[in-house]
Image (tube, grey):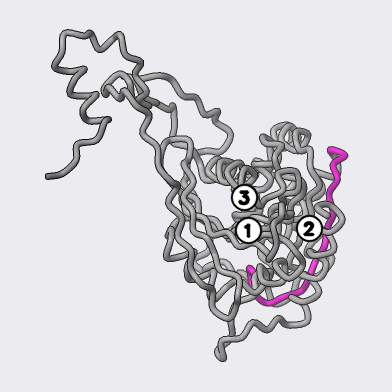
């Protein structure tokens, strides 16, 4: 015969006796709809898996976001007790969940391996995919039928803030030494986060596609074209860069962009790709932070590939960086050493 738990017996007694339920404290997270006399607890689900070519495994964890859904992360820590300085990594847009984490942990973590070797804990994370909801609208929540109701869905950078807060609370993480390293949309998220949140010590934004952040509108004067944008231009001379930057300045809402830049309170390194079709956006992002008097640095590399900061395995299954990647990552290591160690 199966043993009936004390929890079930207590619940049955409460609901069948003459004792009013109101006399027993309700421990439910959802008290309008459910009576829970004893708090329901349990161990956090953690999946530990080995990593290809490494003796340091990854822990896959699940972070509760603002609206009650969960985002997966994968964290790896150096050997020892810690707490360790920690870097969270944001790769472009979100989505794809656990499969993405497993693939990039095993095949796209050359840069993370370098930081592990340098004594950092490293975190791959997933967040919701980017949406067309205009950035800048305030997120409000109100009580609705005992639960939450938002004026809009949380955005991906708000997911990232919750993830960083979760990471900072982990025992092996030094909460006061958490950094951010990113590429493309992940770089724009750093700007948004830095303008609203103070939990990061320093950040690197590689090729930040920060059009929304700097309030950059479309170029209505541009000739319509049926050809797709070339991600890497054949040439981008100093004169071309100057002209593109001047044009980009005419497309932004300068007061709005500066209000965001003025709110930043952390060191940021912006890494540009010299022939990227969005190079003017990267540079303007940097100059606005500089105009606001922020601790911002600029580095530029002439590499063929968008996202070159993240080292992937080659056809032989090895992590091999080219000279430009090596130079960029060496500088990133020195940058975080200045701010996190």
Image quarter (top left, top right, bottom left or bottom right) of the C terminus: bottom right
Q: Earlier in the sequence, mark 1 or mark 2?
A: 1
Picture residue at 46% right of the left edge, 55% below the top: 46
Q: Is residue 191 above or below residue 14?
A: below
Q: Position of residue 164 (x, y in %)?
A: 61, 45
Picture residue at 52% right of the left edge, 60% below the top: 59
Q: Tell me the number on the disc at residue 219.
A: 3
C-alpha distance separating marks 1 and 2: 33 Å
Bounds of the magenta segment: 292-307
Q: For residue 300: magenta?
A: yes
Picture residue at 61% right of the left edge, 41% below the top: 165
Identify residue for label 1: 89
Q: Nearer the viewer, residue 37 or 295?
A: 37
**Secondary element type, mark 3:** loop
Q: Tell me the number on the disc at residue 303.
A: none
Q: For residue 189: magenta?
A: no
Principal SS element in the magenta part?
A: loop
The reply to whether discs 2 and 3 touch (Cβ–Cβ < 8 Å) is no
Q: Nearer the viewer, residue 13 or 102?
A: 13
**Secondary element type, mark 2:** helix
Q: Is residue 294 left or right of residue 191?
A: right
Q: Is residue 239 left or right of residue 71?
A: right
Picture residue at 32% right of the left edge, 14% below the top: 24
Q: Quadrant location of residue 312?
A: bottom right
Q: Position of residue 71 (x, y in %)?
A: 46, 49
Identify residue for label 2: 243
Question: Crowdedness of circle 1 by 10 Å Cα count: few (<14), some, many (20+)?
Answer: many
């Amino acid at each position: 015969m199966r043993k009936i738990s004390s929890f079930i017996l207590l619940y049955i007694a409460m609901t069948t006796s003459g004792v009013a339920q109101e006399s027993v404290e309700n421990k439910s997270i959802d008290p309008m709809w459910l009576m829970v006399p004893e708090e329901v607890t349990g161990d956090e689900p953690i999946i530990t898996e080995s990593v290809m070519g490494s003796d340091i495994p990854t822990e896959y964890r699940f972070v509760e976001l603002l609206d009650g859904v969960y985002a997966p992360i994968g964290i790896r820590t150096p050997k020892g007790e810690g707490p360790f300085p920690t870097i969270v990594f944001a790769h472009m847009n979100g989505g794809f969940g656990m499969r993405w984490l497993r693939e990039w942990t095993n095949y796209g973590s050359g840069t993370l391996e370098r930081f592990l070797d340098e004594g950092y804990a490293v975190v791959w994370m997933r967040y919701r995919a980017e949406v067309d909801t205009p950035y800048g609208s305030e997120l409000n929540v109100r009580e609705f039928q005992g639960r939450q109701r938002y004026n809009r869905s949380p955005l991906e950078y708000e997911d990232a803030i919750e993830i960083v807060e979760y990471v900072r609370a982990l025992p092996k993480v030094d909460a006061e030494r958490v950094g951010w390293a990113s590429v493309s949309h992940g770089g724009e998220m750093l700007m948004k986060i830095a303008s609203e949140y103070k939990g990061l010590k320093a950040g690197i934004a590689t090729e930040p596609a920060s059009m929304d952040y700097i309030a950059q509108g479309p170029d209505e004067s541009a000739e319509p074209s049926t050809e797709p944008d070339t991600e890497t231009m054949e040439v981008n001379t100093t004169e071309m860069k100057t002209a593109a930057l001047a044009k980009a300045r005419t497309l932004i809402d300068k007061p709005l962009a500066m209000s965001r830049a003025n709110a930043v309170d952390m060191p940021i390194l912006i890494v540009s790709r010299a022939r990227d079709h969005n190079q003017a956006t990267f540079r303007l992002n940097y100059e606005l932070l500089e105009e606001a008097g922020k601790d911002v640095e600029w580095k530029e590399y002439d590499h063929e590939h968008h996202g070159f900061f993240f080292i992937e395995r080659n056809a032989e299954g090895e992590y091999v960086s080219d000279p430009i990647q090596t130079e960029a990552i060496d500088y990133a290591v020195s940058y975080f050493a200045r701010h996190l160690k």
